[in-house]
Image: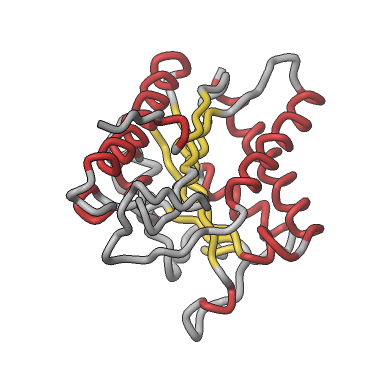
Amino acid sequence: MIFVNIQDYIELRRGTIPLIFSVPHGGTTNFEIIPDRINGIHGVDKETIRLTFDLIEKIHEFTNLKSKDNWMPSYIISKIKRVKIDFNRKETEAFYLKSNLAREIYQYYHNKILELISYNLKKFNRSLLIDIHGFEKSKRPKGFRDVELVLGTNNLESMFPEKLPKKDWGKNFRGKIIRKFNDLTIPIAPGHHTRKEYALTGGFIIQKYGASRIKNSQAIQIEFSDNVRLYDALLREKTLKSLAQLFFEELSLTD
């Protein structure tokens, strides 16, 4: 029998505001004890873990100037390479199914997301889950716009329990992000709150924990380009500062 310390595989903290960051594909540790997945995408979303902690630091910096409260988001982060476990897939596709260890870690990750959401709903009557991913601009499908961020909300189902009329699509946090980055001239998809574009549905995590499944629990998948994550320090700084401000403004409405 092998002793399992879940903290070796998952990093977790409960925060003081109704904001949760999930980072399912940033892990770089190749735990040999976990068998490789046979199917699916195996690539790491490089530097999404460091980007998340940098974003948390920007939230601290911004809120320290604006509030006396201690603003600390919750976070749950996989340290495991995606080839071992893909937490953004349903269980039957997420790991080698004969591995009890992989199943235990996968279920722990998802149980903890649910616990964090439940805590937020009880304490704040709302929860905002941001699932952080990365994409490589050189691999975007031919014909699609060159952007730095992609927002996924499962066609707003992860934001609202019922379908909204098109005129109301921009009256929410996703719309605020779109307008902010348009003002900054940082290309974002969708480029307008009523526009549908490629790769905007989002994955399993936001579909499972969004508003269409859990009342008052909103979820957005944010994909950051490799420019933001790896290559352009000024763009990264501008992006994270702007997101920190948006989170502060949105969550200040929670009181």
Quadrant where the image shows the N terminus: top left
Left or right of 153? Residue 67 is right
Q: Position of residue 160 (x, y in %)?
A: 36, 41
**Residue at the spot 40% in from the left edge and 42% down from the top edge:** 159
Q: Residue furthest front?
A: 1
Number of numbered callouts drawn? 0
250 or 11: nearer the viewer: 11
Q: How is the image coloured?
A: secondary structure
Q: Is residue 216 visible?
A: no
* Picture quadrant where residue 247 is located: top right
77 or 137: nearer the viewer: 77
Q: Quick check: 99 above or below 232?
A: above
Quadrant where the image shows the C terminus: top right
Q: Quick check: 146 above or below 191?
A: below
**Residue at the spot 51% in from the left edge and 25% down from the top edge:** 18
Q: Residue furthest bottom?
A: 142
Q: Position of residue 158 (x, y in %)?
A: 37, 45
Q: Position of residue 148 (x, y in %)?
A: 63, 65
**Residue at the spot 58% in from the left edge and 58% down from the top edge:** 46
**Residue at the spot 52% in from the left edge and 63% down from the top edge:** 190
* Picture quadrant where residue 117 is located: top left
